[in-house]
Image (cartoon, rainbow, N blue to C red):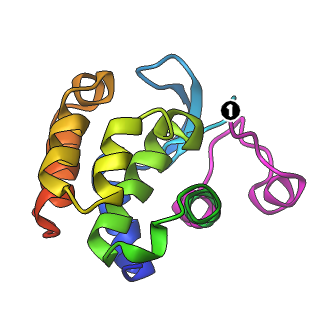
Amino acid sequence: MIDANEITKRLLLHEGCVDHVYKCPAGYLTIGVGRNLETNPLTPREKEVVGDIKNGITVEKCLYLLKNDVKRCERDLINNLSFWYQLDDERQYALLDMCFNMGIKRLLKFKRMLGAMLIGDYRGAAKECLMSKYAVDVGKRAQRIARLIETGVWVK
């Protein structure tokens, strides 16, 4: 997997960092770096560290939640994708980004894309990525991720 600082920079590019609770475009209560509080509520430990979020949180607390979210996504990907360790770092990041954005359950519905990645058909996987509601919903982010899946090269 790529460096944690690089993952943070990329997710900040895609998600931004919001210090207060807001409704994301999908209508979920969210805070920090895209932390969906409805599908991924704060753990007791996170509540202890972050404190009362009603009045907002600091950038440091946003990054603390992000670090935990990245770890959760990595665990989900390792536990659900038999070919995870066969992928290069950049393609692992592409799936991590998608998992972060939509969750593992929705990502696993990308059966044709994941099947193409399993056999190394990255062009086909990128095409499947772009022919999805995800691509419509997130626009340039999906284009960037599909290009990463196809080429294995990050372009901002």
Asked where in the image residue 124 lies, by quadrant, the reply is: top left
Please name the residue shown 58% across and 66% down the image: 78
> Residue 105 at what x, y percent from top left?
58, 36
How crowded pointer 1 is (Cα within 10 Å; few <14, some 14-19, many 20+) is rated as few
Pinpoint residue 40: horizontal percent, then vertical percent. Answer: 69, 40
Q: Is residue 64 magenta?
A: yes
The residue lying furthest to the top in this view is: 27
- Report the front residue among 126 and 73: 126
- The quarter of the image holding the N terminus is bottom left
Looking at the rendered image, the quarter that the C terminus falls into is: bottom left
Residue at x-position 44% and y-position 58%: 96
| Magenta-highlighted residues | 39-67
Question: Looking at the image, which is closer to me, 59 or 142?
Answer: 142
Work out whether residue 141 can be spotted: yes
Please report the residue visible at 57 percent of the width from the left and 22 percent of the height from the top: 28
Residue topped by disc 1: 39
Residue lying furthest front: 119
Q: Is residue 80 left or right of residue 126?
A: right
* Image quadrant in which you'd find residue 11: bottom left
Identify residue type, mark 1.
Thr
How far from the left and from the top, in percent, is residue 125? 23, 47
Magenta run includes residue 27: no
Which element type, helix, strand or loop, lies under badge 1? loop
Q: In this view of the protein, can residue 16 be seen by the observer?
A: no
Between 114 and 156, which is closer to the camera in this rendering?
A: 114
- On screen, residue 133 versus residue 144, left or right, reads right
Tell me residue 17's x, y (percent): 43, 50
Residue 101 left/right relative to 145 = right
